[in-house]
Amino acid sequence: MGIELDLSDPARPVGTMPVAGNTQPYGLLHGGASVVLAETLGSVAAALAAGPGRVAVGVDINATHHRAVRGGAVTGRTEPLHVGRTTASYEVVITDETGRRVCTSRITCQLRDAPPR
């Protein structure tokens, strides 16, 4: 997928992904690739929020695709909506290189104790 993460603010991860290699047959960014980017960012944020000895498990994700992208890269920015003891929800806004919104996704993760090894 070619995702590059920026964790300078661990509560709000940012990720960049190239369009090339992540397209559907018409040459447009695949909607599933946008969801992969959103789930990666939301899951990383939730795992960091869960803390040591705990894990984040995805329970829901949705996405609204606003516009097509044919080239360049897209950037996802994560915003916490709710971070509690047992669940964490995030909005991930994906934009193209000109800052236009491409996709809006919401992800919710359950925060649990890590299983014994």
Image: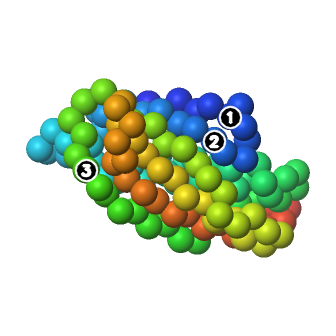
Q: State the image coordinates of residue 16 (x, y, percent, origin top left).
A: 47, 33
Residue 111 higher or lower than 44, as above or below: below
Which residue appears at 70% of the width and 66% of the height? Answer: 82
Q: Quadrant of the C terminus?
A: bottom right
Nearest the viewer among 109 and 69 is 69
Q: Which residue is mark 3?
A: 67
Which residue appears at 73% of the width and 41% of the height? Answer: 10
Task: State the CA–CA distance, disc 1 to disc 2.
Answer: 5 Å
Disc 2 versus disc 3: nearer the observer: 3
Where residue 93 is drawn, which disc sits there?
none
Q: Identify the mark nearer the N-term, 1 or 2.
A: 1
Mark 3, other Cα within 10 Å: few <14 / some 14–19 / many ≥20: few
Q: Identify the mark nearer the N-term, 2 or 3.
A: 2
Q: Which residue is mark 2?
A: 13
Q: State the image coordinates of residue 60 (x, y, percent, origin top left).
A: 53, 71
Inspect the image, locate mark 3, and give the three-letter code of the amino acid beneath it. Arg
Q: Secondary structure at mark 3?
A: loop
Task: State the CA–CA distance, disc 2 to disc 3.
Answer: 23 Å
Task: State the CA–CA distance, disc 3 to disc 1.
Answer: 27 Å
Q: Is residue 108 left or right of residue 52?
A: left
Inspect the image, locate mark 1, and give the three-letter code of the amino acid beneath it. Leu
Q: Quadrant of the N terminus?
A: top left
Quarter of the image for residue 81 reads bottom right
- Asked if residue 7 shows in the view, the reply is yes
Q: Identify the mark nearer the N-term, 3 or 1.
A: 1
Mark 1 and mark 2 residues within 8 Å of each other at the beta carbon: yes
Q: Which residue is mark 1?
A: 7
Which residue appears at 25% of the width and 40% of the height? Answer: 69
Inspect the image, locate mark 2, and give the three-letter code of the amino acid beneath it. Pro
Q: Is residue 77 left or right of residue 25?
A: right
Q: Secondary structure at mark 2?
A: loop
- Asked if residue 58 shows in the view, the reply is no
